[in-house]
Amino acid sequence: MSKTNDQLRPQDITPKTVLRSTYWQSLVITFLATLVIVTIANWFLYREILGEARAAVHQDIQMLASKEAK
């Protein structure tokens, strides 16, 4: 017969169950925090790389236009 949460008595909650639930909670929190941090970092890096690429393309177009003008 399995016990439900209503049937658990205080003496049934052992340090092992507390440690196990704390372990899973810390894993979930760590995963979510990592996901948020990586998402924010990628957004900033992507924006930086895109800005540099736009500047490079603009510079190349100006160089080509100046060569054709000569």
Image: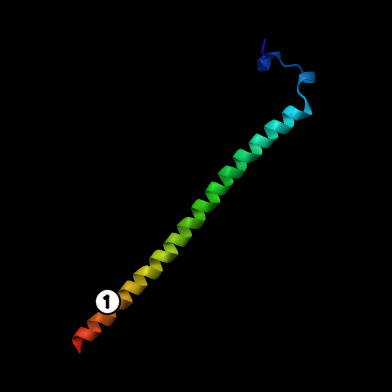
For the residue carrying disc 1, how many other residues have a C-alpha within 10 Å: few (<14), some (14-19), or many (20+)?
A: few
* Numbered label tally: 1
Task: From the top left corner, tell me how far across and down residue 63 is, in percent.
Answer: 28, 82
From this viewpoint, which residue is outermost toward the left?
Answer: 69
Give the residue drawn at x 56%, y 43%: 32
- Relative to 20, residue 67 above or below: below
Q: In this figure, which residue is indicated by the disc labeled 1?
A: 61
Residue 3 picture quarter:
top right
From this viewpoint, which residue is outermost toward the top?
Answer: 1
**Type of the residue with mark 1:** Ile
Q: In this view, does 23 lie to the left or right of 41?
A: right
Quarter that holds the N terminus: top right
Task: From the top left corner, tell me how far across and down residue 9 is, in percent.
Answer: 76, 16
Give the residue drawn at x 25%, y 80%: 64
Give the residue drawn at x 39%, y 64%: 50
Residue 59 picture quarter:
bottom left
Task: From the top left corner, tell me how far across and down residue 52 is, in percent.
Answer: 40, 70
Q: How is the image coloured?
A: rainbow
From this viewpoint, which residue is outermost toward the bottom?
Answer: 70
Quarter that holds the C terminus: bottom left
- Relative to 17, residue 37 above or below: below
Q: Is mark 1 on a helix, strand or loop?
A: helix
From this viewpoint, which residue is outermost toward the right?
Answer: 11
- Relative to 59, residue 40 above or below: above
Task: From the top left corner, tell me how far across and down residue 11 is, in percent.
Answer: 80, 19
